[in-house]
Amino acid sequence: MSGADKRTGEDTGEELRASRRRWLLALPLAAFAVLAALFLVRLWSGDPSRLPSALIGRPAPATVLPPLPGLQRDGAEVPGLDPATFKGAVTLVNVWASWCVPCHDEAPLLLQLAQDKNLRIVGINYKDEPENARRFLGRYGNPFQAVGVDRNGRASIEWGVYGVPETFLIDREGRIAFKLVGPINPDNLARTLKPAIEKLR
């Protein structure tokens, strides 16, 4: 074999190895793109509650959270989050923050739900400043019978929270029965949330 033929063979072998390396580097990126596309399709499917939750049917996390300092309702201090109180009543748990724009939009609908005396409404205040949270509830009204403060966000991770706002329904046995990702709006309130509440009664 001449020197030129040998160099050509070496060049071809090097090109094949480089091509294989490029494919191997591209595979994880392609896999990530496919997973991201599937997630976005589910997200944009029109019903945010269809996002998967491994917690449906399981007991609510045994997360005890301190109360929001200085928050009162009907002249009494509003307690923090105690999962022991979930049992015996249908409970709506709303994860919210004063800095969350969609939380402002859903606030009047939470007040509307609070008129149902057979539904307990509990809030988890997520990564918020206490004075801002109190100001938020002072502006819109307080629908919550209890508000637990999750200053560092760890408790919300236990609940499987993607981001605020999110809403959970807890059945009378203390199990998570329903999860709504995103804000409550008139459409999902009528179409999914209220029927889910009635189903748990």
Image (cartoon, rainbow, N blue to C red):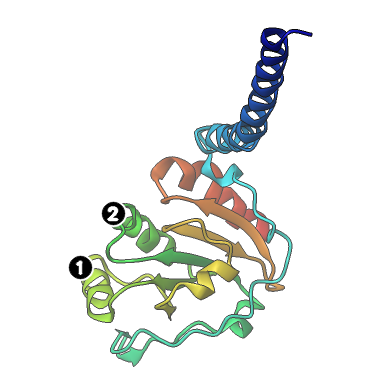
Most extreme residue toward the bottom is 76
Most extreme residue toward the front is 2
The part of the image, by quadrant, that contains residue 76 is bottom left
Q: Position of residue 161 (x, y in %)?
A: 53, 61
Up the image or down, 56 lies above or below 34; here it is: below
The mark lying in front, picked from 2 and 1, is 2
How many residues crowd mark 1 within 10 Å: few (<14), some (14–19), many (20+)? few
Depth check: 139 or 2 in front? 2
Amino acid type indicated by mark 1: Arg
Horizontally, residue 73 falls left or right of residue 120, namely left
Residue at x 32%, y 88% (from the top left corner): 69
User: Nearer the N terminus, badge 2 or badge 1?
Assistant: 2
The quarter of the picture where the C terminus appears is bottom right
Residue at x 55%, y 67% (from the top left corner): 157
Q: Position of residue 26 (x, y in %)?
A: 61, 31
Depth check: 97 or 140 in front? 97
Residue at x 62%, y 35% (from the top left corner): 25
Labels in figure, total: 2
Is residue 144 shown to the viewer in this render?
yes
The part of the image, by quadrant, that contains residue 57 is bottom right
Q: Secondary structure at mark 1?
A: helix
How far is disc 2 from disc 1 in space, using C-alphas? 14 Å
Label 1 sits on residue: 139
Q: Position of residue 125 (x, y in %)?
A: 39, 73
Horizontally, residue 136 falls left or right of residue 200, namely left
Up the image or down, 24 lies above or below 145; here it is: above
The part of the image, by quadrant, that contains residue 133 is bottom left
Q: Secondary structure at mark 2?
A: helix
Amino acid type indicated by mark 2: Val
Label 2 sits on residue: 101
The quarter of the picture where the N terminus appears is top right
